[in-house]
Every structure is written in C-alpha cells, then in structure tokens.
Image (cartoon, rainbow, N blue to C red):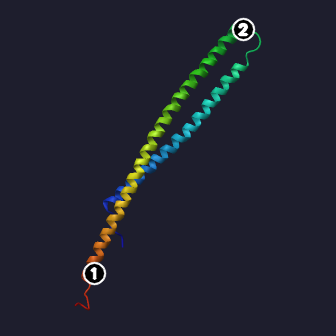
Amino acid sequence: MMTKKNIFDRLSLKKKISLNKKNKISNQLSSELEKNTQLIEQIKELQNDRLKDDTGPRSGYLLKSQNWYSQKLADELNQKQTKQIFIEKELKELQKKIAIEHKNMTKAERKADEKRKEEEDFLEAKRELMTPKINKL
C-alpha cells in the first residue's frame, strides 16, 4: 500500500536535490582551487628560476625580452592570486549555504516523520474504533 507523501516529505526531497547540486558545485570549486594553487606555485617557481640566471653579458634585445617575460609572469601571478581569493570566498559562502540547507533538510525530515507518525496513530485509532469489541463492560 502506497502512502501519500506529506508536504514535509516533499520539502525534504526538494532540499536533498538542492543540497546535492550545491555539493556538486562545491566539489568543482574545490578542484578549481587546487588547480589554481598549483598554477600559482608553478609561476612562482618560474620567477625564482629567472632570478637565478643573471650571469654573463646581455644584449638590449635580450634584456627587453626578459623584462617583457617577467612582466607577463607578474601579471599572470596577480591574476591567478585574485582568482584564488575569489574562489576561496565563493567556497566559504557555498559551504555556509550547504550547512544551512542540510539543517533545513534534517528539520524537514524530522517534521515528515512526526507527521507520518501522527497519521499512523490516527489511522490505528480509527481502525480500533471500527473493530467490534466482544467483551464490553
């Protein structure tokens, strides 16, 4: 026998779906954060390697080229660090929303269980009133 879903069951399912979507987005942001961190480390390593190679005479063209390359590395590093800060901020906000959504979902599940129990108690009391009593005093 299939019981009719009460409003709290439906709310709970809606919250679960929303929670799953947010968890998926959180996983994607976490992986993006990890990739971005690795890129920042690689850029810093490139900058450190460039500082070590300062030996010997150089031409004007070589100095200009090195300056351009250093500027590009600095710009890329700045861009990646800004992206890193943004992703961290978004991830923190999303984790707060996930926590609130999880709390609401558990609350809805608890209310659904209470409502289901009330309905079962009501039906059992109704069935008991419907059955004839043999030994009435």
Residue farthest to the front, as pictured: 137
Q: Are marks 1 and 2 in contact (CB under 8 Å)?
A: no
4, above or below 77, in the image: below
Quadrant of image for the N terminus? bottom left
**Quadrant of the image occupied by residue 110:** bottom left
Answer with left or right where residue 34 lies relative to residue 63.
Answer: left
134, above or below 7, in the image: below
Q: Residue at x 36, y 70 (%)?
A: 2
Answer with left or right where residue 89 lies relative to residue 63.
Answer: left
Q: Is mark 2 on a helix, strand or loop?
A: loop
Q: Position of residue 132 (x, y in %)?
A: 25, 87
Which label is found at residue 128?
Answer: 1
Quadrant of image for the C terminus? bottom left
Which residue, given by chain and number where applicable, does mark 2 sit on? Answer: 59
Q: Residue at x 50, y 36 (%)?
A: 88
127, above or below 3, in the image: below
Mark 1 to mark 2 CA distance (whole Å): 101 Å
